[in-house]
Amino acid sequence: MTVETLFGPEEAPVAKPRAIKLKTIKAVYQTITVSDTITDYLRPYRRYTSASEVFDTFQFLRQETKEYFIALHLDGKNRVVCVDMVSTGSLNQSIVHPRELYKTALLSSAAAIILIHNHPTGDPSPSTEDREVTRRLREAGDLLGIRVLDHIIVGDFYYSFVEGGLI
């Protein structure tokens, strides 16, 4: 007498297929068309060669009552491929984290960025916080391979970190 005659042929248990759920992230890059009568405001692939040109384009920020932090994403030839409104703050501060800034810069395949923010008081002198956040953003950009070309503060006139020797 064998086990097979008593219990029948041995069959290996069939494993149930298991479903594995994974979360995936899909990058979405949106192009917005702005129809306006001002045709030379920000031409496609505009290339800035000085801080004063950036100030001329973004001097409308002088009229704002809150701080706005904007990043211009640039391609390998320093042409603007994306304008990102990174954060909107309060009267005297705008919180900017490297993670939020570089998340969109990576999506747009930026090679470099120009940082812009305004001081509603009209005085574009950089605060200690402005200097510190610029340093942190540059360090993060160096790790990612995205250069910070300048940080421009818009007020009654402008302050360029490059022209001021801070970058």
Image: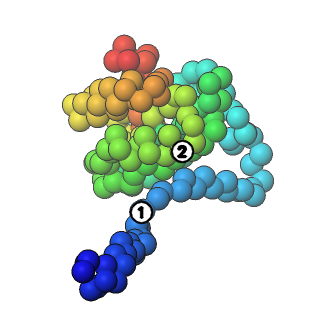
Name the mark nearer the viewer: 1 or 2.
1
Which residue shows up at 75% across the image and 58% down it?
A: 35
Which residue shows up at 60% across the image and 52% down it?
A: 29
Q: Nearer the viewer, residue 45 or 64?
A: 45
Q: Nearer the viewer, residue 117 or 29?
A: 29
Residue 167 visible in this rendered orientation of the protein = yes
The answer to which of marks 1 and 2 sits earlier in the sequence is 1
Which residue shows up at 55% across the image and 28% down it?
A: 111
Q: Nearer the viewer, residue 95 or 61?
A: 95
Q: Quadrant of the N terminus?
A: bottom left
Q: Position of residue 141 (x, y in %)?
A: 40, 29
Q: Which mark is residue 22?
A: 1
Identify the secondary structure beneath mark 2.
helix
Which residue shows up at 32% across the image and 48% down it?
A: 94
Indicate left or right for 136 with 111 as reference.
left
Q: Nearer the viewer, residue 47 or 152?
A: 47
99 in relation to 128, above or below: below
Q: Which mark is residue 107?
A: 2
How far apart are labels 1 and 2 at the CA level?
21 Å
